[in-house]
């Protein structure tokens, strides 16, 4: 048993060392073995061994020579820039896929709207069809390193299962990771949509250098992702960050989760649309002569200074401000980033949310808490899914070598 334990420890140390080197390369760009040793605390010999492994598997490449410090010029290394992943973002009303490189750049994307409630096998076929379209156009399939999937929660990241999202019943208990892995024979990682979007900001967005961050996804549903010490904080049973399902209004409307008065039931895109439709049914509001309404119609009406549309969206911003302030008082994050269609479709919401949060939080320091709108719009979960699989690969570099 002792020898088995020793072997397991040696493999774990090897995994950690490789991971340290990958992250150092990502943060530094072109760098020498000696510089990598200084950054990671590993010996130059250990760095040299790891770099040789990465070169053999096309994970890194030589990028020229550095400045001489009295002897021969050191060889510089960088991550192979042509490597990419495929990301899949599952939404309430559409599925997106994209090829995304290690810099978070979308190289190619596909999107398909979901009309009505599709069955699980129909959704599976649609996801694979969209991935196939990306791969058909790729001349360098050997550079594809893995597939990341973002989906509404709750999800089980260990088994790769979408458990029971309130707004998409068809994907309940869907073992999507196993399905995609079997089909494409590549590493696959599933992440909850808000966690993925938080990782996207951390890896590629404005929060790259922050150690702790609360990400709020204000879209058709409302979710939250927590970054703590540079990693997603999952909590017990992967449930941390579900900001959309804490109670804001006792006795409020019933939520899709079965509870009452949740933030999602009051301030999500679905809730806004339901309120607008109720006004429409009562003939209190007929935006631009339309006989139906959706979020885009409401955003356009607010932009045109339609009072009821602005009232709906300001009420939403107020609820979001209160909900986010509650979360900030519990988590005390270094910063808060808000993404999703609500803050992008109605930019004025950010001013209301920022004021309410800074007015209500206890630990505010000398300066107001940093609250930003996500730099990613409808691509937030798509970029996030890419960040999730890159993070998975960087945490277990052996996956690059299989």
Image (cartoon, grey):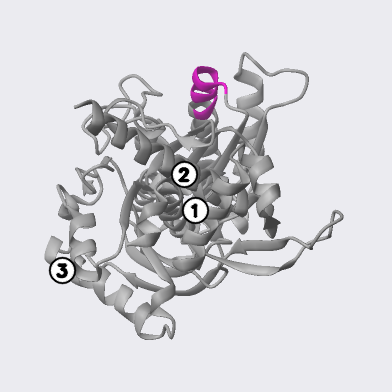
Q: Nearer the viewer, mark 3 or mark 2?
A: 3
In primary-sequence order, the first of circles 1 and 2 is 2
Q: Are marks 3 and 2 in contact (CB under 8 Å)?
A: no
Q: Which residue is mark 3?
A: 122
Any part of residue 293 in sight: no
Give neighbour class at mark 2: few <14, some 14-19, many 20+ (Cα, 10 Å): many
The numbered mark at residue 218 is: 2
- Give how far across and how far down residue 32 sits, in percent: 69, 56
Residue 244: image quadrant is top left
Residue 341, labelled with which disc? Answer: 1
Magenta stretch mostly in which secondary structure? helix
Quadrant assignment for the N terminus = top left
270 up-or-down from 254: above or below: below
Relative horizontal placement of residue 192, taking residue 353 as reference (left or right) = left
Tell which residue pokes out farthest to the right in this image.
70
Magenta stretch bounds: 324-332
Picture quadrant where residue 77 is located:
bottom right
SS at mark 1 in the image: helix
Q: Looking at the image, is 321 positioned above or below residue 307?
A: above
Say which quarter of the image contains residue 104: bottom right
Mark 3, secondary structure of its residue: helix
Q: Residue at x 38, y 68 (%)?
A: 97
Tell me which numbered mark, 3 or 2, is placed earlier along the sequence. Answer: 3
Residues packed near mark 1 inside 10 Å, few (<14), some (14 to 19) or many (20 plus): some
- Residue 163, given in percent of the width and then of the height, sits at 19, 43
Determine whether label 3 and label 1 are within 8 Å by CB. no
164 relative to 263 in the view: left or right = left
């Amino acid at each position: 048993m002792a020898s088995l334990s020793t072997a397991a420890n040696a493999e774990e140390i090897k995994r950690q060392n490789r991971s340290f080197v990958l992250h150092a390369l990502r943060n530094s760009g072109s760098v020498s073995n000696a510089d990598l040793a200084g950054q990671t605390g590993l010996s130059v010999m250990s760095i040299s061994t790891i770099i040789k492994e990465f070169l053999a598997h096309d994970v890194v490449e030589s990028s020229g020579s550095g400045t001489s410090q009295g002897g021969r010029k050191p060889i510089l290394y960088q991550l192979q820039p042509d490597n990419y992943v495929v990301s899949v973002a599952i939404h309430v009303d559409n599925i997106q896929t994209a090829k995304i490189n290690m810099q978070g750049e979308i190289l190619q994307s596909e999107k398909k709207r979901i009309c009505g409630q599709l069955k699980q096998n129909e959704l599976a076929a649609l996801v694979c069809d969209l991935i196939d379209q990306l791969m058909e156009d790729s001349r360098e399939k050997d550079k594809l390193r893995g597939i990341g999937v973002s989906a509404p929660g709750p999800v089980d990241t260990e088994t790769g299962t979408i458990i029971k999202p309130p707004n998409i019943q068809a994907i309940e208990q869907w073992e999507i990771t196993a399905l995609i892995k079997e089909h494409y024979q590549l590493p696959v990682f599933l992440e909850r949509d808000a966690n993925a979007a938080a990782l996207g900001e951390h890896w590629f967005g404005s929060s790259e250098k922050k150690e702790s961050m609360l990400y709020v996804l204000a879209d058709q549903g409302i979710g939250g992702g927590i970054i703590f010490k540079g990693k997603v904080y999952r909590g017990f049973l992967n449930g941390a960050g579900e900001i959309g399902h804490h109670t804001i209004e006792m006795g409020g409307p019933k939520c899709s989760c079965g509870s009452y008065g949740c933030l999602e039931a009051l301030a999500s895109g679905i809730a806004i649309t339901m309120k607008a439709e109720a006004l429409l049914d009562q003939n209190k509001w007929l935006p631009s002569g339309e006989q139906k309404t959706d979020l885009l119609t409401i955003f356009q009406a607010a932009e045109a200074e339609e009072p009821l549309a602005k009232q709906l969206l300001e009420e939403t911003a107020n609820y979001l401000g209160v909900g986010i302030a509650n979360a900030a008082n519990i988590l005390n994050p270094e910063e808060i980033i808000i993404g999703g269609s609500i803050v992008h479709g109605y930019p004025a919401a950010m001013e209301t949310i920022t004021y309410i949060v800074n007015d209500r939080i206890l630990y505010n320091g000398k300066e107001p808490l940093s609250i930003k709108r996500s730099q990613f719009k409808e691509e937030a979960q798509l970029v996030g899914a890419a960040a999730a699989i890159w993070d998975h690969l960087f945490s277990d570099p052996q996956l690059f070598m299989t």
